[in-house]
Amino acid sequence: MPQYKSEQAAGLDLAACLPRGPLVIEPGSIVKVPTGIAIAIERGYEGQVRPRSGLASTHGVTLPNTPGTIDSDYRGEVLVPLINLGRTAHTIEHGARIAQLVIAPVSRSRLIEVDSLDETARGAGGFGSTGVG
């Protein structure tokens, strides 16, 4: 079962379910790691699957799509895609904590098609347009 590991933890730790043995993630490879659980998230919320900081900073193993989203209507097994950005293979053992799950509220918007947008000081400035540092 996912668990909060401290009283004020925001995320529930997700563990690998690998009863047939460990899984090796080669450098540059992406694998979908089973957790052995399926969940029902309340309508109006989502599950955000996020990397574990220790796994990422120590071994270079993280999520290729972070945060991943689990929609409230999904009922399949929670799989965690992991990518090895490190220089050496990394082994995931059965029961190893591989990610964290944060349950968060979701807002849904009403989209309106328009011919133009209002002007702002930033305008169409994209990546890096508000400065660095």
Image (cartoon, grey):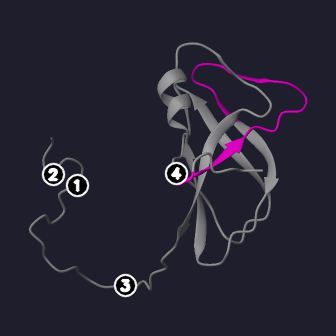
Image marks 2 and 1: residues in contact by CB distance under 8 Å: yes
Image side of residue 128 versus residue 71, left or right: left
The tag on residue 113 is: 3
Q: Earlier in the sequence, mark 2 or mark 3?
A: 3
In the image, farthest residue toward the right: 20
Q: Which residue is mark 1?
A: 126
Q: CA distance from mark 2 to mark 3?
A: 26 Å
Q: CA distance from mark 2 to mark 1?
A: 5 Å
The local crowd at label 3, few if under 14, some if 14 to 19, many if 20 or more residues have their Cα within 10 Å, is few
The tag on residue 67 is: 4
Report the amino acid beneath label 4: Pro
Q: Which SS class for mark 2? A: loop
The local crowd at label 1, few if under 14, some if 14 to 19, many if 20 or more residues have their Cα within 10 Å, is few
Report the amino acid beneath label 1: Gly
Q: Earlier in the sequence, mark 4 or mark 1?
A: 4
- From the top left corner, tell me how far across and down residue 20 is, in percent: 91, 29
Image marks 4 and 2: residues in contact by CB distance under 8 Å: no
The magenta region covers 7-31
* Rendered position, 25 above or below 14: above
* Rendered position, 25 above or below 106: above
- What residue is shown at x 62% (from left), y 26% (from top)? 29
Image marks 3 and 1: residues in contact by CB distance under 8 Å: no
